[in-house]
């Protein structure tokens, strides 16, 4: 971590960008055998003749020249669209698909490429690199392979082929998302979008359209603190690193949140030595402390990783003229110089900043807060006077509530529900987060310190339950018994306050807990649910069964 930003996943109760630790990983109304998921969104395939016919047969009203003649200060009387979305990332895409389901005539504006950060420079290509690092790590672990009765020697990789795998995956998913929008009749408008006035949007050079409702979904960009010079070659952000143009012998990673952790997993598996630079006194400061301690033992200590905590990277100079990358460290508290590092490369993983400049917010009297668009619990934009701006919403990283791709999608769907006439408030505490290291880390809800603080303030007690992957048959069969699941709950009511998992497929396992929290399911009910044996899901089954709740079962779950 550097300055005031970390990429550690956290609870929204603790989320204040530039002050605390932030994180950067739709919901179908009716399941379909033709539906797939990408980054938490449905991809409606092209083989949907009935749905496509229904959408394409609608009377469509395209942009008219008259739209630009109305004054910016007053809303138009008729509209070109029911909904216009500025930004075609994960959040915008999810909102657009749900809007079509609701029968809204929808357009989406994109000034870069469909898919936004997640698909092109984030979640998707990073998972391709992590898939490679996971295979490499397993093949290089002679003890692990021998325990399974396997003999493997000479595991290696082709850097360009690995890079191509990540690039090709991003391209494939981007095309899928584009095709899904087109197939469902969403107009894709190319150009940078901005607000001209109430219910009026400009895109490109001078194209103007009107909409009954507008969603801002412009996302975020990597945050680079002052004093750090990024050249895109030896000093890079995640945008550059995902191209894997080089695998340095020694790389410093500034920030030990989930981005930094995932890249350390990739680089060490491919042969690099890694040095973490973290401003706080411990690595992974946004995780539950017990999980952080275990993660350090499993993901840091056995690997070629060292670290400096309690320091800022005050100045970073790229390699040039035969000299290495130079990193000047200062004490985070005293600001006194501590030491200077010379490394082959540096990755800046200090969080993300909202991409909201040039949106024309001044035309509707909206002032950003540290770059974020202020919104209420329903994602309605708030102006400088504290009033709601009619028919204007902001979702995803641009509002800073919870900087996760699937959170943006969920917020977009929530907004579409509202503009369709159904009130909806999203429970951000039920949104899970994951770090795709090997093994994985996942979490939902409050950490133990946050839960204790809440309990003290609201005068109730909390309890902790834990289970180990060492007791799970499937994990042992895979020789992957290293792991822990932790449940934080209220024994007087059975309410789930938080769940944290480190272990094999933790990112998949967390959803039983997050869905239970979203639906308000209590422990005394969910502990009767049946899990297939032997599966990793039994880790959560045992976790819920081990909790001691002082209330009776309210309803049967399994009969």
Image (spheres, rainbow, N blue to C red):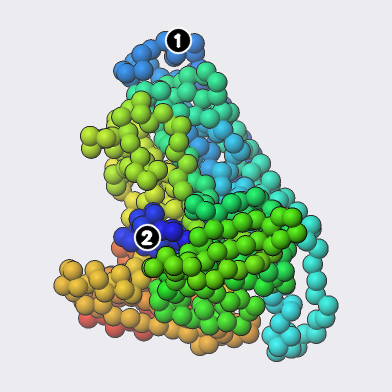
Percent across and percent down for residue 234 are: 68, 57
Question: Residue 12: which quarter of the image?
Answer: bottom left
Is residue 15 visible in the rendered image? The answer is: yes
Q: Is residue 411 above or below residue 489?
A: above
Q: Is residue 202 above or below residue 147?
A: above
Q: Nearer the viewer, residue 373 or 93?
A: 373
Mark drawn on residue 190: none
Indicate which label's residue lies in the foreground, 1 or 2: 2
Which residue is tagged 1?
A: 66
Mark drawn on residue 20: 2
Percent across and percent down for residue 349 are: 54, 59
Left/right placement of residue 228 relative to residue 70 reads right
Question: Residue 327: which quarter of the image?
Answer: bottom right
Is residue 278 visible in the rendered image? The answer is: no
Left/right placement of residue 223 relative to residue 342 reads left
- Which residue extends farthest front? 336
Q: Is residue 465 above or below residue 160?
A: below
> Of helix, strand and loop, which one carries label 1?
helix
């Amino acid at each position: 971590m550097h300055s005031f930003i970390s990429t550690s996943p956290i609870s929204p109760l603790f989320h204040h960008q530039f002050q605390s630790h932030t994180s950067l990983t739709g919901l179908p109304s009716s399941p379909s055998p033709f539906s797939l998921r990408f980054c938490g969104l449905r991809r409606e395939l092209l083989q949907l003749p009935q749905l496509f016919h229904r959408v394409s047969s609608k009377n469509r009203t395209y942009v008219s020249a008259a739209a630009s003649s109305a004054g910016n200060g007053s809303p138009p009387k008729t509209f070109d669209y029911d909904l216009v979305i500025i930004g075609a990332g994960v959040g915008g895409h999810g909102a657009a698909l749900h809007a079509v389901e609701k029968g809204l005539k929808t357009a989406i504006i994109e000034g870069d490429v469909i898919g936004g950060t997640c698909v092109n420079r984030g979640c998707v290509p990073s998972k391709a690199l992590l898939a490679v690092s996971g295979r490499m790590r397993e093949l290089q672990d002679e003890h692990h392979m021998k325990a399974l009765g396997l003999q493997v020697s000479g595991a290696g990789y082709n850097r360009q082929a690995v890079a191509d795998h990540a690039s090709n995956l991003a391209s494939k998913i981007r095309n899928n998302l584009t095709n899904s929008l087109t197939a469902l009749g969403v107009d894709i408008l190319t150009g940078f979008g901005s607000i001209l006035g109430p219910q009026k949007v400009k895109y490109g050079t001078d194209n103007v359209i009107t909409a009954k409702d507008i969603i801002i979904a412009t996302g975020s960009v990597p945050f680079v603190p002052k004093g750090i010079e990024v050249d895109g070659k030896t000093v890079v952000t995640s945008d550059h690193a995902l191209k894997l143009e080089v695998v340095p012998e020694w790389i410093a990673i500034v920030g030990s949140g989930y981005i930094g952790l995932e890249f350390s997993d990739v680089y060490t598996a491919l042969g690099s030595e890694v040095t973490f630079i973290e401003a706080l006194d411990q690595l992974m400061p946004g995780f539950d402390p017990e999980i952080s301690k275990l993660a350090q033992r499993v993901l840091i200590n056995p690997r070629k990783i060292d670290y400096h905590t309690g320091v800022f990277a005050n100045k970073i100079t790229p390699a040039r003229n035969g000299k290495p990358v130079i990193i000047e460290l200062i004490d985070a508290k005293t600001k006194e110089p501590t030491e200077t590092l010379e490394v082959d490369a540096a990755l800046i993983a200090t969080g993300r900043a909202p991409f909201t400049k040039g949106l024309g917010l001044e035309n509707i009297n909206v002032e950003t807060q540290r770059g974020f668009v202020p919104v209420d619990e329903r994602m309605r934009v708030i102006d400088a006077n504290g009033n709601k701006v009619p028919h204007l919403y902001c979702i995803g990283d641009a509002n800073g509530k919870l900087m996760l791709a699937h959170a943006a999608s969920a917020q977009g769907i929530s907004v579409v529900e509202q503009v369709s006439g159904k009130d909806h408030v999203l429970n951000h505490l039920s949104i899970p987060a994951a770090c795709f290291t090997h093994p994985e880390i996942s979490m939902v809800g409050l950490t133990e310190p946050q839960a204790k603080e809440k309990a003290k303030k609201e005068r109730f007690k909390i309890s902790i339950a834990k289970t180990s992957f060492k007791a799970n048959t499937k994990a042992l069969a895979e020789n992957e018994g290293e792991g822990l699941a932790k449940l934080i709950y209220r024994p007087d009511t059975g309410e789930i306050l938080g769940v944290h998992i480190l272990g094999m497929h933790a990112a998949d396992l967390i959803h039983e807990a997050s869905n239970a929290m979203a639906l308000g399911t209590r422990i005394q009910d969910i502990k009767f649910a049946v899990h297939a044996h032997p599966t990793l899901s039994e880790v959560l089954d045992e976790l819920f069964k081990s909790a001691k709740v002082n209330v009776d079962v309210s309803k049967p779950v399994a009969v």
